[in-house]
């Protein structure tokens, strides 16, 4: 019998032939002569046809086969995913409400990744849908960024986006040269049947490929992110006065006498939040001050509408695309030291045992005394040398104690503590990437996180209790089947847990039971992927990961539209300030939906950029040997994360020539048929970087 892949190809050829000739019937001899079969496959044709008959995909009449008359054509719309194609496989998928639809490479038409396509479902087998793309309903892109390449006298375009699975011919270079980064307008997406290749014309030359700033710019162009603000927005911004009127200061709570400070990354320029702490009469009063952007931006302004369109600020390794113009984000509203600033302050009063006695929110004015960064606060907490003010040190140590208590209480409720370091890129004087390192969550990060969670949870509860509407940050419970699958996998890898616990507590205990860092590297991402993605909505269904009934985003109004909207809702719904244009419920849902979409866009843009930068860094390291860890696997590859550099790559199973290996998904194992050699998650391996394609491609060194 032909292997499974070849069998599917033969079945597809048979069904396409019978579909095109619906009124005709063919004998085995007819089919054998009409189909491009290999010599030994003619003998297997009878078995293949009998399989198709049993599945009612073909019918038999007088010993001749035709397309099944009872076979109804179902058509659905979905998003094309070309991830398999770019990795060299002869199939792709369409993601649809009916489920993922398998599409053979011969049936993809001229669809490209993320295109909206119309698919005809041909049949279902063992729970998998199989289909054919009939047409592209809507293109995901009209322009692509990428590199100009030259081969055998012709110029080609190599797209930046990793999932664009072909190169393009260039009909007009517009002065572009080889190895330059350009923006290409697609003129024709090609036609496989007519052998017409996709092509386009260069509409913008961005610069030299390989330069980190140009690489970043190309992806900003690819994701159609705005590099400038509209004129009407800039005109409104110019009219804003930096000096705060005395009348406005007088009507607010004046907290300028409090010792106040910010803690941010060293490179930060927009300071949304500041902290104050007062210890008095055996009580602790914590002030979380958040920039009051609503004083400057009304809901009927061009500034607000532009912020809604952008959804959030976009952070790239070397560039920030702000939600609000720099005059607002980095100057007027940024809580810079030694400057009076308008804020909204959440005040939390604790007793001596750190139980919450009372909370409130008010309009305020502050004057930050210190701009701190995470590193210097951690240096203090770790007992290192520091030059901080004595009074500030005392406040920070008290806050450290409060933060530890808040963390314990969150754990008691079922807070899920993922341990997933981010990556940081370091650059030399010429702007080239000199190193890539992993971040770590420290006490200073946790301190700020706890203060922000406290303010966010309070404002969500306040709005839920007293307002007719709001925006919430929601995180729905994972599907039971997803949790069961993860539990079986973790049990196999000897991670123990207690049954009969509520799901948040169960996942929390699993994460806390990881015996070492390698387990976190492997299983934290797997557990996270089994859960649903957090999003914004007007219905408060709770936040599963934080174990909160009510949660919203309030603490970053400079860089997130939902936070800015929540500030307006506090004015509108809680303080009943009716001078501003009211945000209606329909508009609120539109803001929530768009914010969720723009957040996904930001995630995708950041992921593409980081992947590009990692490849740039590794391109001159081909041939070098590294120690790594098997962090995942699939039907075709072992997925390796290096120990010394936070980058991942693939060992193709086809490159393991000592045996014929198969992947078993239930326990995430790859097993050799002859020698029964087994590759498992957490296995330590030595690898050599062989080349860089869609992924980093490694070879296994024993």
Image (cartoon, helix red, strand yellow):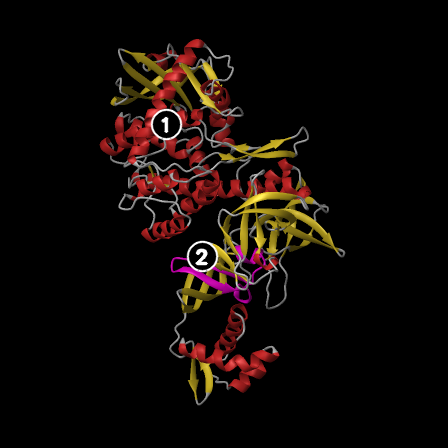
> Can you give x and y, in whole percent of width and height, for residue 18 in the image?
49, 78
Does the magenta run of residues contain 92? Answer: yes
> Can you give x and y, in whole percent of width and height, for residue 175 in the image?
72, 45
Q: Is residue 103 above or below residue 327?
A: below
**Label at residue 665:** 2
Residue closest to the far front: 675
Residue closest to the far right: 153
> Can you give x and y, in whole percent of width and height, for residue 619 in the image?
66, 43
**Relative side of 168 to 267, left or right:** right
Residue 467 appears in the rendering: yes
Does the magenta run of residues contain 169? Answer: no
Q: Is residue 287 above or below residue 698?
A: above
Q: How far apart are labels 2 and 1 at the CA level?
A: 38 Å
Residue 209 appears in the rendering: no
| Disc 2: CA contacts within 10 A as few (<14), some (14-19) or many (>=20) | few
Residue at 59 percent across and 79 percent down: it is 40
Extent of the magenta region: 83-109
**Relative side of 8 to 246, left or right:** right
Residue 559 or residue 296, whichever sits in front? 559
Mark in the foreground, 2 or 1: 2
Residue 583 or residue 74, whichever sits in front? 74
The residue pinned by badge 1 equals: 450
Local SS, label 1: helix
| Quarter residue 465 falls in | top left
Q: Mark 2 or mark 1, which has the lower sequence index?
A: 1
């Amino acid at each position: 019998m032909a292997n499974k892949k070849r069998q599917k190809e033969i079945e597809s050829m048979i069904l396409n032939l019978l579909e095109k000739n619906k009124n005709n019937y063919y004998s085995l001899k007819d089919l054998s002569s009409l189909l491009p079969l290999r010599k030994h496959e003619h003998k297997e044709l009878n078995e293949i046809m009998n399989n198709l008959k049993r599945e009612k995909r073909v019918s038999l009449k007088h010993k001749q086969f035709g397309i099944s008359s009872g076979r109804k054509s179902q058509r659905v719309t979905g998003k094309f995913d070309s991830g398999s194609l770019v990795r060299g496989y002869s199939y792709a998928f369409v993601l649809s409400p009916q489920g993922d639809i398998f599409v053979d490479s011969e049936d993809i038409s001229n669809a490209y990744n993320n295109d909206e396509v119309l698919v005809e479902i041909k049949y279902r087998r063992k729970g998998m849908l199989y289909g054919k793309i009939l047409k592209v309903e809507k293109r995901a892109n009209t322009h692509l960024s990428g590199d100009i390449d030259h081969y055998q006298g012709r110029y080609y375009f190599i797209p930046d986006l990793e999932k664009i699975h072909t190169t393009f011919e260039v009909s007009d270079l517009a002065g572009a040269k080889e190895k330059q980064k350009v923006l290409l307008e697609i003129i024709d997406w090609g036609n496989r049947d007519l052998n017409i290749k996709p092509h386009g014309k260069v509409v913008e030359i961005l610069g030299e490929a390989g330069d980190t700033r140009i690489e970043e710019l190309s992806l900003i162009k690819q994701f159609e992110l705005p590099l400038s603000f509209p004129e009407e927005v800039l005109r409104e911004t110019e009219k804003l006065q930096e000096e705060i009127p005395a009348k406005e200061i007088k009507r607010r709570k004046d907290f300028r006498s409090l010792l106040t400070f910010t803690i941010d990354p060293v490179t930060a320029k927009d300071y949304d939040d500041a902290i104050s702490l007062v210890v008095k009469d055996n009580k602790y009063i914590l002030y979380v001050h958040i920039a009051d952007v609503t004083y400057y931006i009304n809901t009927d302004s061009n500034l607000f509408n532009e912020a809604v369109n952008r959804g959030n600020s976009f952070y790239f390794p070397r560039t920030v695309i702000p939600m609000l113009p720099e005059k607002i984000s980095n100057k007027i509203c940024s809580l810079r030291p030694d400057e009076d600033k308008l804020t909204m302050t959440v005040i939390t009063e604790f007793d001596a045992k750190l139980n919450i006695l009372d909370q409130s929110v008010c309009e305020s004015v502050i004057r930050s005394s210190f701009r701190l960064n995470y590193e210097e606060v951690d240096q203090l907490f770790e007992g290192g040398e520091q030059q901080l003010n004595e009074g500030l040190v005392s406040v920070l140590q008290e806050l450290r104690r409060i933060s530890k208590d808040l963390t314990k209480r969150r754990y008691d409720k079922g807070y899920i503590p993922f341990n997933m370091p981010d990556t940081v890129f370091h650059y030399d004087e010429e702007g080239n990437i000199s190193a890539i390192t992993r971040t770590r969550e420290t006490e200073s990060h946790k301190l700020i996180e706890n203060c922000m969670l406290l303010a966010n949870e309070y404002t969500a509860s306040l709005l839920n209790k007293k307002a007719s509407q709001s925006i919430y940050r929601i995180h729905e419970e994972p599907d039971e089947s997803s949790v069961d699958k993860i539990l079986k996998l973790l049990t196999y890898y000897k991670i123990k847990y207690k049954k009969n616990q509520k799901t948040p507590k169960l996942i929390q205990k699993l994460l806390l039971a990881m015996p070492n860092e390698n387990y976190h590297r492997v299983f934290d991402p797997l557990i996270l992927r089994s859960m649903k993605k957090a999003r914004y909505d007007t219905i408060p269904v709770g936040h599963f990961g934080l174990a909160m009934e009510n949660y919203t985003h309030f603490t970053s109004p400079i860089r997130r539209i939902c936070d800015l909207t929540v500030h307006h809702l506090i004015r509108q719904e809680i303080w009943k300030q009716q001078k501003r244009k009211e945000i209606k419920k329909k508009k609120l849902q539109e803001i929530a939906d768009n914010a969720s979409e723009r957040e996904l866009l930001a995630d995708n843009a950041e992921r593409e950029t980081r992947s590009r930068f990692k490849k740039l860094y590794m391109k001159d390291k081909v041939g070098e040997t590294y120690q790594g860890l098997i962090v995942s696997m699939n039907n075709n590859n072992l997925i390796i994360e290096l120990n010394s550099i936070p980058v991942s790559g693939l060992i193709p199973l086809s490159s393991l020539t000592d045996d014929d290996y198969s992947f078993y998904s239930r326990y995430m194992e790859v097993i050799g048929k002859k020698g029964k050699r087994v590759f498992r998650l957490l296995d330590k391996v030595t690898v050599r970087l062989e080349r860089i394609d869609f992924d980093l491609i490694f070879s296994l060194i024993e």
